[in-house]
Image (cartoon, rainbow, N blue to C red):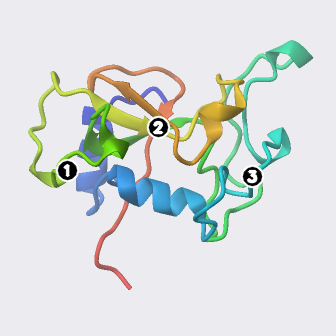
Amino acid sequence: MNVNWTEARAYAKWAGGDLPSEAEWEVASRGRLESKEYPWGDKFDSNNLRCSQIAFGDSGGTASVGSYPTNGYGLYDMVGNVLEWCLDAYDANYWKGTQFIEPSNLPDSNSVVRVLRGGSWSDDFPDFFRCADRYRNYPDYWFDNRGFRVVFRGLR
């Protein structure tokens, strides 16, 4: 998608939503399978996502939405295809019980490293596609394996 965090957030706000927090993204990715490694279960299966198949003659790139099965919430491509920007600043100790900081209170600074989740078409190692796997980058960085989702909080 070639989009950086700043552009992704601006679009999400324009559309009336925002980027998901890291916690929201992970819950959505699991699709009711809270204790599983991947959105479809515990075993890696490249038939369930867009990932690097360069060794098999595939030059890479994204797949059309709907090319792979949905997860338990009916969401497409929660892992694979593109890494997805999250609202949060990156904290290396996220899983070690550090003090919770509401992501919406963080500064929109280009010096604050931001979280990406989901693995992308350019990744090939199964761990990169686990629901719990995390990436980080500066918000002004873009590449063709970066994308985003918009969340609309409070809608029912």
Furthest-bottom residue in this view: 156
Q: Nearer the viewer, mark 1 or mark 3?
A: 3
Mark 2: secondary structure: strand
Q: Nearer the viewer, mark 3 or mark 2?
A: 3
Q: Give residue 135's mark.
A: none
- Can residue 80 be seen in the rendering of this structure? no
User: Could you say which is closer to the camera, residue 39 or residue 74?
Assistant: 39
Task: Answer left or right for 86 relative to 9.
Answer: right
Q: Which residue is mark 3?
A: 42
Residue 91: percent from the left, percent from the top? 27, 35
Q: Which residue is mark 1?
A: 103
Residue 154: percent from the left, percent from the top? 28, 78
Q: Going from the N terminus, do you reach mark 2 or mark 1 first?
A: 1
Residue 61: percent from the left, percent from the top? 68, 26
Q: Residues within 10 Å of mark 1 (few under 14, many from 20)?
A: some
User: Could you say which is closer to the camera, residue 147 or residue 28?
Assistant: 28
Quadrant of residue 139 within the rendered picture = top left
Q: Residues within 10 Å of mark 2 (few under 14, many from 20)?
A: many
Mark 1: secondary structure: helix
Gap between marks 1 and 3, in whole Å? 29 Å
Amino acid carrying mark 1 in the image: Pro
Furthest-front residue in this view: 96
Residue at 28 percent of width and 22 percent of height? 138
Q: Which residue is mark 2?
A: 147
- Can residue 114 be seen in the rendering of this structure? yes
Amino acid carrying mark 3 in the image: Asp
Q: Nearer the viewer, mark 2 or mark 1?
A: 1
